[in-house]
Image (cartoon, grey):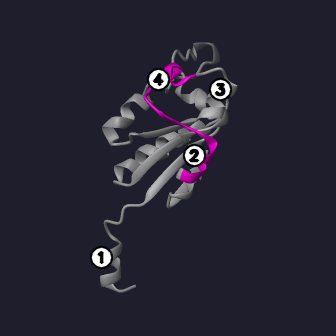
Amino acid sequence: MSEEMMDDEEGVIKKFMYVNRKAPYGSIYALESLEVVLIGAAFDQDVSLAFIDDGVYQLMKGQRTSGIGMKDFSPTYRALEMYDVEKLYVDQDSLAARNLTADDLIVPVEVLSSAEMADLMEDQDVVLSF
């Protein structure tokens, strides 16, 4: 690859969407996703997160994990803004199916219909599902 081509590729910002579909505890998916998001943000990429299905539970207020012997990592979502990760999207149908609203979540989110979420995903350069 020529030096000119490498210079052109440096500084290119890509749109990364991390799709969270799993409950916050019982597997490593939610915590791994959060760690990958922080790494992506550190490299100045355009990072967004989508919460679908049981993934909406990751953002739920009042998580108490002492009974399962795991650390509650949900407050980390409030720190995302410090890393310029401000695009958080939640699937409307997933919230409704779990009797939740945006007011039940620990951080501000944009609630999207399934069609809006699909359009947003299509607009991304990279979509990673956890």
Task: Out of 116 and 6, give the one closest to the viewer.
Answer: 116
Give the x, y percent position of residue 54: 66, 32
Q: CA distance from mark 1 to mark 3?
A: 47 Å
Q: Quadrant of the C terminus?
A: top right
Across the whole image, how many numbered discs are drawn on residues? 4
Q: CA distance from mark 1 to mark 4?
A: 41 Å
The answer to which of 107 and 27 lies nearer the viewer is 107
Q: Which mark is residue 106?
A: 4
Of the pair 27 and 97, the residue shown nearer to us:
97
Q: Nearest the camera: 67 or 12?
A: 12
Image side of residue 74 versus residue 91, left or right: left
Q: Which residue is mark 1?
A: 7
Between disc 3 and disc 4, whose residue precedes?
Answer: 3
> Which residue corresponds to mark 2?
117
Q: Nearer the viewer, mark 1 or mark 4?
A: 4
Q: Amino acid at mark 1?
A: Asp
Query: Which stretch appears magenta?
Result: 101-119
User: Residue at the location (46% across, 23% down)?
Assistant: 106
Res 94 → quadrant: top right
> To which quarter of the image does residue 32 belong?
top right
Q: CA distance from mark 1 to mark 2?
A: 34 Å
The residue to which callout 3 is attached is: 96
Which amino acid is tagged 3?
Ala
In the picture, measured across the screen, residue 127 lies left or right of residue 53, that is left
Check disc 1 and report its element: helix, strand or loop. helix
Residue occupying image coordinates x 35% and y 86%: 2
